[in-house]
Amino acid sequence: MLALLGSSVAAAAGSSPTPASTARWQQAMRELRAPGKGCFTGSYPLVQWRRTECSTAPDRRYLPRGASAKSGPQTVGDGFDYSAVTSKPLSSVTGSFDSITPGTTETGQQNGTGGQVANTFSLQLNSEFFSSPVCSGSPSPSGCYGWEQFVYSTTYNGIFIQYWLIDYNTTCPSGWAAYSPGGGDTDCYTNSPGEELPSADALTVQELPTVSVTAKASASGDSLTLTAAGKTYTVSTGNKIDLYAYWRSAEWTIVGDGDGTEAHFSSGTTLILRSTLNDGNANLIPSCELPGGYTGETNNLHLPAGPGLGEDTLQAGETSSASTSSPSCGDAYPIGQEPGSGVAVRTGNPVGEADLVTEGANHSLQYYWATPGGSWDHAQIAGAGTTYSAPSIFVRAVDPAGEADIVAEGANHTLQYYWATPGGSWHHTQIGGTDSTYSAPSIFVRSVDPEGEADIVAEGKNNTLQYYWATPGSAWNHGQIGGTDSTYSAPSIFVRSVDPEGEADIVAEGKSNTLQYYDATPGSAWHQSQVAGTDTTYSAPSIFVRSVDPEGEADIVAEGKTNTLQYYEATPDSSWAHAQVGGSDSTYSAPSIFVRAVDPEGEADIVAEGKSNTLQYYWATPGSSWSHAQIGGTSSIFAGPSLFVRAVDPEGEADIVAEGSSNTLQYYWATPGSAWRRVQVAGSGTTFSG
């Protein structure tokens, strides 16, 4: 059946597709089964495969690990890489690129010899080594392993599948070629047919954010699909080594183009790669393996201290700057859970000072501060290996006035708390022990009874919702608000100064992508209600309770389905109202909300990461339509931003902070009606959270 994406025949006639519609088309093509064995291609906007003539894949070995003889610091490849691992057999894996540093260049050897040639690399989606039934022909079947590689080669400019029998150690099966790695061993390899791309569609490194590679395995056969912008190509072939029955691990990488070669990236390069795993029914929650690499090809980039793990993905960076700490799966961090609470502006001494906190290099805790018109100061609050989430800050307006309180997830999933008064030293205590904290926490300090109490919420073990509270000088108390499988994001907390005074309101993403709300007044039991149902919420939500008309209204924002921006509002004891602020493909992070108590009074301001790593801003006064502006352009931010609106001079100024390109710290500000301004607070390699 033929399907058409788009609303007009003009789109089919060649008008340029928008990024949003192209992304939807790419997803549809990845999911569309090829109509048989062979080679096929597709073009936007038709959701349809067109059969093409297969070609012969290159007679080039994409070697198993152990092929490299290079010395020096360990870089990516030849067995050293993060792999995504599951306990269930995999049906498909998609590899894609979240971002690449603008201006990046790459060179490599062609056909394993000669000088360096621009844009010479391979994209590889590799299985683990596994006990294939085809090894039964080996004199030692238990020591023989199958291995399958899904490859795009720039030298060939096409895609194909390469199969291996490692340590087969006898005459290879018919149609397989022999390879001798040394030590008297014999490996065997063979290729599927190949699908060549037109020369005009040859990939360059700067096009990688538009590229995805999907590998599929089943009892009836295996396939490889490459999509790039508005074109897609696939090879569908038979089942050679029974990968489908054993596939549990996937290595997604960009390395040299075969024969153990290396891809050389320019200085200053950072790549963000994403692996999404599926068992044929649903996306799977992966774990991390290191060393989890299987290919013998390499690149000259370094792995960061830990990868990001999300509900259905493993996200790993590769950078030309070596980390000062060794990479480790133990340093894996949650992604898509930025609560947007890394900035606070003081109303007391020093009035107007903006305080920023971030996770820094090597999981340190970094603090920046500046008064209006002054330069930024910086201090490291906690050293390497202390901080494993976006931190949250609150500056007290009550005794001890001016004290800054900071919370963050620490090593081994602990909950860490830091505090200091202006001019004083930072103090530290551990609030929650090992395995207590599995998200960025959120903190709020009460200005109402019990005055000065600090309230902290975080996702706990087994997707529970955990709550901690203490008044100055007293011990921390702890309670579990939501049970197992209740909480699937960093929660957000707000304590009301208006009726019902002292009520703590908490929101979090719940099971099945629902939006959950919890509330309690001091000394009473927690109440729970569902604000929005299944498949509505795809990020950590953000909450703000109004002290201005309509007084007591709770406003909540979250990323919705298909990357929309969703807004919910309710006054006490009323039903929740809902509006979509941003349409499909508008929102790619947890948003942050702040409601103004100063002119324009009652205006709700929202910020979020938009498509192509842009910074998007939305605002509306009660009863009016939402307005929108793009504050930061393509590749300007790389995490959920955080927002604060000043009640002190310059009154009404909105201050926004976010992680920028190359792990910088970016700050944006504007007063109502004026243009947005920006300054870089901290340089490359300083900032690793929203």
Image (cartoon, grey):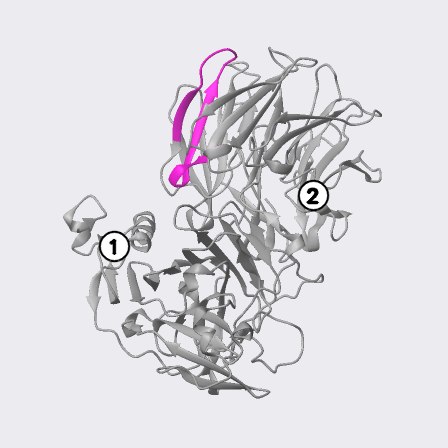
Viewed as shown, does residue 631 lie left or right of 339? left
Viewed as shown, does residue 469 lie left or right of 115? right
Residue 342 percent location from the top left of the image: 63, 39
Residue 570: say if magenta. yes
Residue 257 percent location from the top left of the image: 45, 77
Residue depicted at x 66% and y 53%: 331
Q: CA distance from mark 1 to mark 2?
A: 47 Å
Q: Magenta region, mostly helix, strand or loop?
A: strand
Residue 663 percent location from the top left of the image: 59, 54
Q: Which residues are magenta?
A: 558-580
Viewed as shown, does residue 372 lie left or right of 612? right
Q: In this figure, which residue is indicated by the disc labeled 2?
A: 413
Upstream in the sequence, badge 1 or badge 2?
Answer: 1
Residue depicted at x 19% and y 56%: 14
Tell me the kind of residue under disc 2: His
Frontmost of labels 1 and 2 is 2
Tell me the kind of residue under disc 1: Ser
Q: In this figure, which residue is indicated by the disc labeled 1?
A: 16
Does residue 645 appear in the picture of this structure?
A: no
